[in-house]
Amino acid sequence: MVKIANPGSSLSRREFLQYALIAGPVLSGGTGMDQFGGDRRGRRRTTGTVRSVDFRAFPVGRLADLNAEFEEAKKDSRFSRNRIFRTSIAPLGFALPGDFQNARSIIIVATLAKSAVVNFKLDGRDHEITVPFQYYADEWTLEKLRETIARDVIKAPGRRIVDVSKRVPLKLLAARSGLGRYGRNNLVFVEGMGSYNLLHAFLTDWECPDNAGTGLDILDACNHCHGCDRSCPTDCITRSEMVIDAGRCLTLYNEVAGDFPNFILPSMHHTLMGCLMCQRRCPENEWIPDAAVEGGEVSEAETKAILRGKPEPALLESLRRRLGLFPAVGQDVFLPILKRNLGALIRS
Ligand code: B12
């Protein structure tokens, strides 16, 4: 049973999921979350209030320190030298964009994220394949995020709100602003969402109170838990070190085109893209309902066309529209990745 704050009642899982879909956001921000029974020290819990969005405002004046911290991390030998990893983090930092030098605050937002399950039909069989959050467009559109910030954070109209999620190291900002805490699996856990959340950052010209900020502590629960390091299929998480070996992470390879390295065995594939193992086995996520959404169906003919690598452009476009898949991947690389990943799953 999951407890919902509002009705004060216990609901069945099915009732809860229905509730969660229609309830809309449980909002808070800037303050501690103890009124919701939250435990900022990260002890393991089995119940609590599930939230769909949370945020912190962080003054731009303090970004220089964060930038220096991130630059130091990039030089730190504990972080992988892997070329794909290095290429993806190289452009990240906290410098203000040239066209928004007068920004005053940065709002870091976490949204509860649900995976989708897509049914690929092939040879008379159903292949129900999970598409983890981040690889399909959920209800948190850019517009909805901006509206939420204007209404619930800034609480005034007319402010400039610019999405900088692609250029900012989101986890460090989330941890340093007090929105969440790093777990052993290197993800940031947010109260009421566990690690099932996506992060977003927006610069604004609104002056926020300078009261956010916190140390960098791992969740207490991670000090005595082996959940994620034992379940990581490629051993990229270790007990002794906080930093993961990103160069061994399954996600690093199945997000981009190309052959998988030898250490990735066929049996390790379990999602259409990305990986969910270090989150599924995490006790901190146990009480967050695995509210997988219905991702739709791909017909037998369509599945075959994908596996042959020759779907019509119209089919690809229709898949993108129907399934909202892979928003992060460009059209040119979409098909080879889809073909390779789907093939690996269906064959394994
Ligand atoms: C590059 C990248 C990847 C790479 C590398 C991941 C990595 N660990 O760096 C790959 C492709 C492997 C990847 C995988 C995934 N990613 Co990714 N990824 C990113 C990206 C673009 C940058 C991350 C980054 O800055 N890495 C560089 C390192 C240096 O930063 P860092 O990990 O924060 O390092 C800090 C800590 O190590 C800390 N630190 C050092 N020592 C110590 C000691 C202690 C005690 C503590 C507490 C901290 C600490 O200091 C460092 C910074 O100063 C962000 C988007 C963005 N704009 O930020 C998404 C992002 C991190 N990814 C995300 C997600 C969801 C995933 C996946 C779950 C996707 C999936 N389903 O497979 C997996 C999870 C893999 C994992 N367990 O980490 C989310 C995470 C959300 C969250 N709540 O944490 C992000 C933020 C995207 C988003 N918009 O929400 N990702």
Image (tube, grey):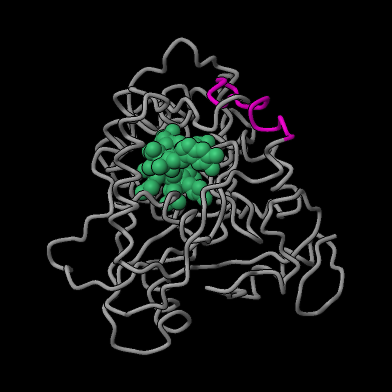
Which of 261 and 179 lies nearest the eye of the viewer?
A: 179
Q: In this view, does 204 lie to the left or right of 200?
A: left
Q: Residue 223 at what x, y percent from top left?
A: 69, 36
Residues 140 and 226: in front is 226
Q: Is residue 186 above or below residue 99?
A: above
User: Which picture quadrant has residue 173?
Assistant: bottom left
Is residue 162 toward the left or the right of residue 271 in the image?
left
Residue 301 colored in magenta in the image: no
Residue 241 at x, y percent in the picture: 55, 27
Q: Residue at 58% of width from left, 75% of height from top?
A: 27
Numbered-mark total: 0
Q: Which residue is drawn at 41% across and 73% down?
A: 210
Image quadrant in which the N terminus is located: bottom right
| Quadrant housing the C terminus | top right
Figure quadrant of residue 165: bottom left
Please name whichever residue, 214 or 28, is drawn nearer the observer in this view of the structure: 214
Q: Give the range drawn in magenta.
A: 224-238
Q: Position of residue 332 (x, y in %)?
A: 24, 37
Residue 293 is situated, as x and y percent measured from the top left of the image, at 61, 55
| Residue at point 70%, 32% (across, down) | 227
Res 302 seen here: no
Q: In this view, does 210 lie to the left or right of 346?
A: left
Task: Report the image quarter containing ligand 1.
Answer: top left
Q: Residue furthest top?
A: 262
What is the chief secondary structure element of the magenta stretch? Answer: loop
Reply above or below: 285 against 99: above
